[in-house]
Amino acid sequence: MSALLVVLLTGVLTAIACALPGSFLMLRRLAMLSDAISHAILPGIVLGYFLAKGPNFALGLLGAASVAILTVGLIELLQDVSNVAGESAIGIVFPAMFALGVLTISRYYANVHLDTDAVLFGNIEFAPFESLWVGEHHLGPQSLWVTGGLALLNALFVGLLYKELQLATFDPALAATSGFSPRLLHYALMAVVAVTSVAAFTAVGSILVVAFMIVPAATAYLLTDDLRRMLVLAAGCGVASAVIGFVLALALDASVAGAMASASGLLFVTAALFSPSHGLLARARQLRRQRLEFATETLLLHLRYHETLPGEEHELEVAHLSNELRWTPRFAQRVIAHAQRSGLVQRTNGHLALTEAGRAVAEHLSARTGAGLERARA
Amino acid sequence: MKDDCAQSHSDHGFAIVADDVTVTYRDRPAVQDVDLRIPPGRLAAIIGPNGAGKSTLMKALLGLVPLAAGQVSIFGQPVARQRRRIGYVPQRSSVDWDFPATALDVVMMGTYGQLGWLKRPGPRERKLAMQCLDAVGMTAFADRQIGQLSGGQQQRVFLARALAQQADVYFLDEPFVGVDAVTEKAIVELLRALRDQGKTVVVVHHDLDSAPEYFDWLVLLNVRLIACGDFRQVFTIANLRRTYGGAMTASIRHFEWLELEKHQTSAPIS
């Protein structure tokens, strides 16, 4: 398999593995958890070093994974006993764990180069060069086995427990009274996040894992109101980020992990701006349309009121309107144009008159709300 | 009247029995030493001032908070063994309404308890959920994201979800908060219909004005149990004074109603 293809596939599989539990993390407002884990595992790495009496990948990984699970356990405990909210509990636990690691290193291993990179050297560019061997058998790049295994495991986890995770995330109280322990599900999800984070750190490095855990999920959240679709979209956005980032890195001759993480950020910004349901532009457009429609209703009521009164023909002059309704002349023109386009109002010699349809709408409006006429009179 | 709720040897036939229930938050008891009994087929209110522990008592009955002392049984069994017979509507503010789910998705969640672990909801559950949405007049909103519903509509969806639980005992925590008058009426009608089918319905409520019209069993609570029993016997000035203490927040209207009651000697409530 070509080395480049291994890099791309590793990125794609990491994206899928991270996006699935990441979606639930985001909905539970625990987005920073994987970032916290990347720091908190330092004492685990020291423990692995101590047990192996030297640098050892397997023991370092085992130490890191155990400490990651311990970390999420401590975060839970803190929330339970002291009512500290989720993100704050994360903020308390991970510096403490990191500090413990720093302290042990400075006390016992001051002369050794030992930091998170010593075990979690993960760098996606090296993915093709770390092979998995079982005895004499060469099984191909280790990163593909690790990230592929994670993707499969997490797809199974989310697929089998979809209903339970959905309920426990949305309404833990109902989950509990329905016999699905929200605590058990929470710990299961946290364990999955801890194992995924640590294992993926070794394959692709921490920054890409942290990005893939949250950003594609946040992007998908902006694109749909359906959890099932959100999970699929999150994985899809992750895969797209990996592919776009890979192409960018090749074109710019830049860091692959950096380019993939940046691509996920770009996709998020695009969704935040252009999402048809939640995007900024869609909201601005909706607000504009609502203003125009409201103003058109006001115009119709105003015309309806004044056409019944003799000697008030001047009220129907276009020039008079913007003054009377306190609209800028430009906005008044827009409203009139909109009303004309909709066939509610016709304009002759600078005077406005309701069409039959316009009169019907106006009457319906004033019947619906007595306040309508007041509004027109104001 | 308090005798209706005291411990006795003939607890058979009660839907809900609680003995000596105490729940503490930090070192302060939120609910202390509460004995209560609610017979089946009743529409019961838990009423008391703010901070009286009404929601906590409900959570204790549901097994959602650890008991410092006491025990609860539902139809003679511990709550943990009766989960499938219990429906629960938490406070509307307790969930995230921006969650990616439609009204139908939320009602479907009511069927999960009967399904159990790992089994997926199918057409049967879907049909049931649609029927429950229909019962609360929300069929037209089945595919609407829940955050786009009004407060009253959200409460109807929650109620539909409880119906989908097909329970024998329903617990509702402040179902009338933030809903319009039409929805409140619709909810009351539904709760009455449930009661008339023989279900037991327990509601945390704080509006004394509407209580006499809605309920037929009453639990008055202010950390400790003040009184519990048939609504008309328990809803007295003396009991309300004891419940609300000096800071009587209750409005004048029901006192007029109570005074009226004395003279007319138990005219039926219309």
Image (spheres, rainbow, N blue to C red):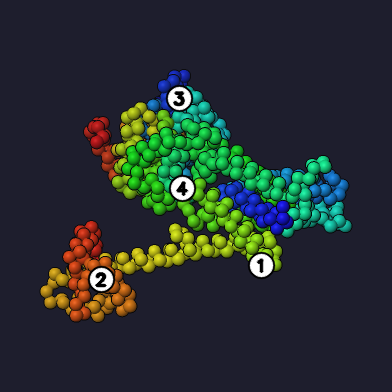
Decide: is A199 above or below A173. below
What is the secondary structure assignment of the residue under circle 3? loop
Mark 4 chain: B
Q: Residue at x 54, y 41 (%)?
A: A162
Give the spatial CA distance, label 1 vs label 4: 40 Å
Q: Residues within 10 Å of mark 1 (few under 14, many from 20)?
A: few
The amino acid pointed to by label 1 is: Ala
What is the secondary structure assignment of the residue under circle 2? helix
Are the residues under badges 2 and 4 in a single subunit?
no
Give the spatial CA distance, label 2 vs label 1: 53 Å
**Residue A345 location, x and y as percent?**
22, 70
The residue at which mark 2 appears reads as: A340
Mark seen at residue A113:
none
**Residue B188 location, x and y as percent?**
32, 39
**Residue A311 location, x and y as percent?**
12, 77
The residue at which mark 4 appears reads as: B101
The amino acid pointed to by label 2 is: Gln
The mark lying in front, picked from 2 and 3, is 2
